[in-house]
Image (tube, rainbow, N blue to C red):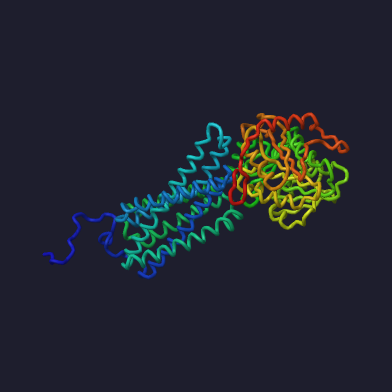
Amino acid sequence: MIEPHAPAPPRFPAPWSASGGPDGPARLPVRPGTGRFLVLAGAFACAACGLAYELELVALASYLMGDSVTQASVVLSVMVFAMGIGSLAAKRLRRLAAAGFGAVEATLALVGGCSAMALYAVFAWTGAWGGMWANGPRCLLVAFSLAIGLLIGAEVPLLMELIQRIRRQDAGGAVADLFAADYVGALVGGLAFPFLLLPFFGQLTGTLLTGAVNTVVGGALVLGLFRRDLTRRARWLLLIGNGLVLAVLASAAVLVDDFERAARQAMYGEDVRVALQTGVREVVLVGGTAGRPLDLYVDGRLRVSGRDELRFHEALVHPAMTGPHARVLILGGGDGLAVREVLRHSGVDRVDVVGLDAEVVRLARTDPALSALNEHAFGDPRVRVTTADPFGQLREADPATYDVVVSDLPDPAITASTKLYSQEFYGLARRVLAPGGRLVVHAGPVAAGPRVYWTVETTVRAAGLRTAPYGTGSPPTASAAGPERSRAPRDRGFVLAARTDPRPRLDPDGPRPSVLTEASLAAGERATRRTRIGDLPASTLMHPRY
């Protein structure tokens, strides 16, 4: 006979539990205090893995698609939204908390661990993020963000249920303990990603390693601590599932080098000679032997094309060298090609180069094809190279130091370069110009991106300089190496600036360029002016316009 205040027995047995139901205390192989500590340690490790997945998606999306602010906003906002949905969905798994948590962690490890490889594969084998595949890869990025966010969001409610199964306590105290472990784990994961995973393992292997840690922690916590909450069948299913996930991640890690080589061949062709990872930047040299022109890619984007680099660098440098040019500052230009053109002018006493990447400068010095292309410019005793942030270098430079400043920097649409195309940056450049000095800026394509180009020109004028826009004026043509990504970008725009009205022309007493002529320079100036977009606001550090 059941006593009046005794709880009624369940109408159906609980097949998932060997301990008498999901609401009773868990039967642990360790003391409750130890069990509680292990659950909080598991929450710590899983939170670290979860944040590493988020940062990996942000970094990879920024690397592949550029515009890191947009990519970070999309990934993080979708993930936070999905975490809320995942938390709500996890309410249905509370009666199966141990089995549910084990399944969630195994799935999260598989999806998160393989996300970088899947995104990189789409980037490599579809040729570009533009064209007919413009929406496909972005949808894949959102899909991974959504899936990972759903699974991360399901963790906390299930962990809360497991903690309460060990020892009941007030909800506020349990939430505080769990969130403390979660937030500290996120801190460790956030620091481990840039300082450990990226520099020592790279994005692909680092993400696979994160997935392996996630699998081991989730599986060990459930199968080791809460195994009595599972039926024999559930234990075997989780054990086999975690084993398969580890096998997939381990196989991918073994094959990652072959995968990267195949991906590079798909992107750059079969002539890849050098492929280096410098921090989060990838530097690739293609061709330069057997009659194929040399191409230099940085972060998957063509920076130097042997097909038209001479035309580009002559147009960038020679109009600015008309006038005093004893002291020249080159911002960017780590490939040495702008330096080569500067050194062709007599009367140059000193060339300071502020390179963005020491590895590119090293290749420009040592790679046979690239050093031959720049005519061993860095071996000239007049050239001094510094690897630093150009913004900081301009702030530290003495006023009126240089006769010519050449800004050979990546396009402003790449977020990392946006501050180097700001009004504040050009104000610093104006400060270091000597009387009669000139600034020339590579401002991106004119025909393909007129709004960006004319925003650069407006921003230079806002810094107190007078401008003369001009360009090379020829549309891009496809190369034999592959689709859109390997095109030689022939449509280039420049802005020549000075305190007095400048005029793009060649120095009558200077060297004769190989490709550039007065006629082509004048034609490029006329073609560029026809694309003018007026009334554009200047870009500043606090209000970037690119």
Q: Camera-side residue: 253 or 473?
A: 473
Q: Camera-side residue: 453 or 149?
A: 453
Q: Position of residue 404 (x, y in %)?
A: 79, 46
Residue 175 higher or lower than 199, as above or below = below
Q: Does residue 479 appear in the picture of this structure?
A: no
Q: Is the N terminus in the top left, top right, bottom left or bottom right quadrant?
A: bottom left
Q: Camera-side residue: 190 or 353?
A: 353
The residue that appears at 49% across and 55% down in the rendered structure is: 51
Q: Position of residue 196 (x, y in %)?
A: 58, 58
Q: Position of residue 472 (x, y in %)?
A: 72, 33
Q: Does residue 7 appear in the picture of this structure?
A: yes
Q: Quadrant of residue 317?
A: top right
The residue that appears at 58% across and 56% down in the rendered structure is: 194
Q: Is residue 69 left or right of residue 327?
A: left
Residue 164 higher or lower than 368, as above or below = below
Tell me how many marks there are: 0
Q: Position of residue 128 (x, y in %)?
A: 58, 36
The residue that appears at 57% across and 45% down in the rendered structure is: 67
Q: Is residue 324 left or right of residue 280?
A: right
Q: Is the C terminus in the top left, top right, bottom left or bottom right quadrant?
A: top right
